[in-house]
Structures are given as structure tokens and as C-alpha cells.
Amino acid sequence: MTAHELLLDAAAFRRMVTAAADAVDAEHGALSRLDAAAGDGDHGINLKRAMDAARSAVARRPEESPGVLLGVVGEACAEEMGGAAGALFGGFFAAAAEMLGDQPDMDGVTLAEALSAGAARVAALGRAAVGDRSMVDALAPAADAARAAARSGSGPADVLAAAAAAARRGADGTRDLVPRVGRARYAADHAVGSADPGATTVALILGAWADAIKEERRMGVHEADDVVAGQR
Amino acid sequence: MTVRRRRLINDPSRAVSDMLEGYVAAHRDVIRLDADGNVVRATPKDRGKVGLVIGNGSGHEPAMIGWVGPGLFDVNVPGPVFAAPGPARIATGIRAADRGAGVLLCVSHHAGDLMNARLALETARGEGIDVEMVVLYDDVSSAPKGREDERRGGAGLFFVWKIVGALAESGASLARCRAMAERVRDQTRTLTAAFGTVAHPVSGEPLASLGRDELVIGVGVHGESGRRVSEDATADEVAERMTSELAEDAGLGPGDHVCVLLSNSGAMTLMELSVVYRGVDRTLRERGIEACRSWMGTYATTQDLAGFALSVCRIDDETLRLYDAPALGAAFVRPARDPRPVTA
């Protein structure tokens, strides 16, 4: 980690939350259709309600640290979405927020730790493991990839990019999985063949975060000088 | 089968809150909405008695908003459509139900209901509230015999609500109320059947991927798929098959007494329900099982789903006395009556 490397601060994190909410705006119909295969077909609408609330709540709190803002996003998920998805997404953000505390910014290692804490909370709350066809199939590989990237010295942008790519692969892989947790297991024959909506949402949010940070880096918003963040 | 997609609501995002305002206004002698959006009794239970609270997704009315009142729940926490309320909301419900003798948080076993309830329990206990949680299940189609605790909650839990509601009203301790909930749960079994599916009230899209004009047994409360029944099956055959499956799972035999619930999931006619009930009653008699009390009507719905839930609960003198105790909810009224043993 060099002094020149990009740190993820609250301003950057607010843009990430907005980017995730925008991505959900664009994709909520598709997410609901995925959910209709074996669920109520309302995951996208519920998620949009939570992300809209998160976006406004975060905008109202310009002074707060990334950890506090993550906590706000978690509350929006838990209370606005409800159901298992609300508890699980709420738990993901809350665990990551607890890991970050109120430090003003995060490096790649801290970000990877926060993602890992979130992934572990979801697995514990949902009593799910990799292969059960759930959010964990995207979150666990994302956390692994984030930690690997951080260990090799990557900053937050590259850590997030690695996490997002792994989450996307994990989510796509749920197409062939038979549900073993959650309500989809009662409609297992309908679920197989399309991706798990929870895992797909994880990939969508992490992807939106990674793109938002990549954009920041391209714009040079938070570069201390002209040294590129690729310097390791 | 066509699915009715258009519903007479103002704005999908306000469907639940508009419903609650209207429902409570229509029953203001029994219930009201508190500041947290919970359905509470118009007149709170006496202090020193155990409080009963449940949270659940909306869209299953009259469950559970119609089951708040004397002899029933103290508080219902209605969540978004088909989604359990979040932990902070459930915690407000626990606080509202606390009458100084502890609170029993009832959970109908569904993943979201349980996860959110667990988190709320932690919060409430952290505040020093004496609260216990009991997880209830009855749907035999959702997990095999021997793995009962993996089953989901269904309409048969109305037996639990009624009996534990009466016990709490009588001033019994929290430990006794909890034990009774588990005892009634373990004697209760439910199976559901439905034709096709229904539209989600917010999205307007059909639930799950059923949508066929055929009868499916073992449908969950959100239209999850089950086993198809041949197209020419009669009501008698369906009733016999479901009743026998329940009796066998519960180990019911000659000399047993049961209460029966036949709950309309939304769009069955009373003609159909009655024809089915006739078959249920006949099957029970053939097996030497006596149905000493029955409820037939609209208890837990999935919007206008054309289906029903059939539940049986093995009953004894103690549980029947509580079953017969008076109750007054917006959707369930039981007048006071003289207690009679099961054999009477």
C-alpha cells in the first residue's frame, strides 16, 4: 500500500450507494422476473424500495463515515424490504458497517475485511453454505476474491473489481443449482435453469460499486497526484 | 385459467397502509393502529398477563390483523406484502405487547419471519424485556415426517393462536404459554390445495409459475408448487386423500378427537368448501376419529387464490376448554359458552 493509493472515503461511498440504487432502478423488473420462477416475483420491487430509501438516507447525512453510511443502508434494507431478503441484505451491510466502525476511509484490506464480515453474517443468518443456491453463492467467492486482491496489495478499486467479477461468476453459476435453503426449495423444479435472484442482486450491487469507483479513479477525483492506483 | 391482475387499490405502494387504515376503521371497537403501525387491542389486556405478538407479511388477511383482541393476540405487526416485517418493527410490537408478565413472540415458520424475529428478540431482550420466541409449523407437504421442525407454518396455527390466546388471557405464566404453543403445534397438521395462482397485489404479476387450471396439493401460502391432482379427481377423492395424509402423519386413529379447520385461501365458494368438508368428515368417521369442533371459512388467504387449507388438531379436555373460551377479534368472535369435555 502506497501513500498515493486511492482510499475509499465517505464521498466516494455515497456515490457507490447512489450507483447501486441507479442499477437497481434499471434492473428491478428483471430481478422480479427471476424471483417469479420460484418465489413471489416481488424481489425487485422490494429491493428498489430499500435502495431508494438508502439513497435518500445517505444523501441526508453528508458528514458521516463510510461505516455509518453502510449501517444506514443496512437499516433501509431490513426495514423497507422486510422478509428474508431484508434480514439478509440488512445483515450484510450491518456486519460490514460494524467492521468499519467510524474510520474516515478504507484501504483495500479494510474493504476486503468488511465484505468478508458481511458475507459471514449472511451465511450465519441464512444458515446457508456455498452450493445451496442463495446470496452466499455470490458473496463467498466475492469475499475470497477481495481478500486475495487485498493480500496482493490492491487498493479498494481493484479489490471491488475482483469481488464484483467473482460475485457475477458465482451468481451465474446458481442457474444449475437446486435450492436447499429459503422458500425456493419448495418450488425447486421451477427454480433450476434461472439464476438465484439474491445472488444476482449481490453481483448487481457489487458491480455497481466497482464501476462507480472505477469511474472515480478515471476522473481522478481522489487521486493525491498523478500516480495511478495501479502502482503497487 | 386467467389471473385477475387488476385490483381496486389506490396506489400499490400504499396498498398495505390503506388497507390497515380501513380495516381498523371498520373495527374500531376492537382494534386500532398504534404510532408504529401495529394493530393493537382497542382496550389493552390487564397488566400482569402475558402478551402475545406476531409479525407476518401482509396479503393473507384476515391473518393476522383480524386476530387481535381479547382471547387472541395483543399485537400484530403487519409487514410488506408477503414479506415479514423487519426486526425494528417486530421489536416495536414486542414492546407494545408487554403488560409486565413477559411476551410470547409467535413465529409462523418461514425463513424471513424467523430471521427477523430472532433479531428482534435480541433487541428486546437487550432492553430488558422478558420475551420468549416460539416457532410454529404444521404444513406436512413442506418436509417429511421426522423432520417436523423444517416444516413451514400454515393455517393450522389458528389452533395455536386460539388456545394460547385463551391461556394467556387466563393469567398463565410465560413458560406455560410457550409450552402450550409447542404442545398444540405438535398435535396440528395442515395440507393445502389450490387451482392456479394469483397476481401479486403490488407487481400485478402472477405468483410462482403455477398458473395452470389444475388442482395442486401442497401449495404454500405464496403459491409454491406442490403435487398435481388428476383432472377428473372429485371433491370426495381430494378430501379423502388429504384427510388420510393428515391423519397418518399425525398418527390419528380410533378414539382420537380432533378440531378441524377448512380455510378458504380466497376464492373458493362456500358450496365447494362444504362439499369438501363433507368428504373430510366422512373420512374421519371411517377412521374412527371424531371431529368435535370445526371452523369453516376465511382464515388465512393468499389474496384471491382459489384454494383451501385443511388442518386437524388432536384435542383433549384441557385444550378443548381453551379452544371454547371466549374471544373477540375483528375476524373471529367466540361467545362464552359452558365448557364441555371432548366426549360430551
Image (cartoon, coloured by chain):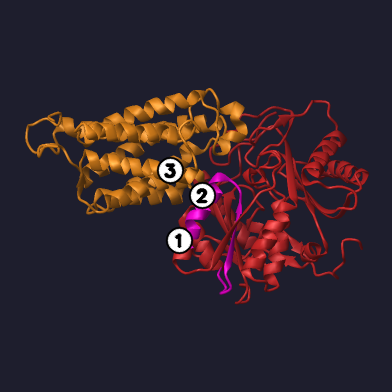
Chain colours: A orange, B red
Highlighted magenta segment, given as a residue range: B98-124
Q: Mark number for residue A201? A: none
Q: What residue type is labelled 1?
A: Thr
Q: From what the image shows, is residue B108 above or below residue B68?
A: above
Asked if badge 3 and badge 1 are on a common chain, one would say no
Q: Residue furthest bottom?
A: B47
Q: Mark 3 lies on which chain?
A: A
Front residue of B117/B144: it is B144
Residue at image point 87% right, 61% down: B342
Asked whether residue B34 appears in the rendered view, the answer is no
User: Marks 2 and 1, how far apart in space?
Assistant: 13 Å
Q: Which amino acid does label 3 sit on?
A: Val
Q: Mark number for residue B115? A: 2
The 10 Å Cα crowd at callout 2, few under 14, some 14 to 19, many 20 or more, is many
Image coords of residue B252 (percent x, y): 83, 47
Image coords of residue B247 (percent x, y): 81, 44
**The magenta stretch spans residue B148:** no
The 10 Å Cα crowd at callout 1, few under 14, some 14 to 19, many 20 or more, is some
Image coords of residue B151 (percent x, y): 65, 44
Q: Residue furthest left?
A: A225
**Residue under numbered circle 3:** A122
Examine the image and state in which quarter residue B318 appears: bottom right
Residue at image point 83% right, 53% down: B258
Q: Which residue lies furthest to the front in this view?
A: B146
**Residue under numbered circle 1:** B123
**The magenta stretch spans residue B117:** yes
Q: Mark 2 lies on which chain?
A: B
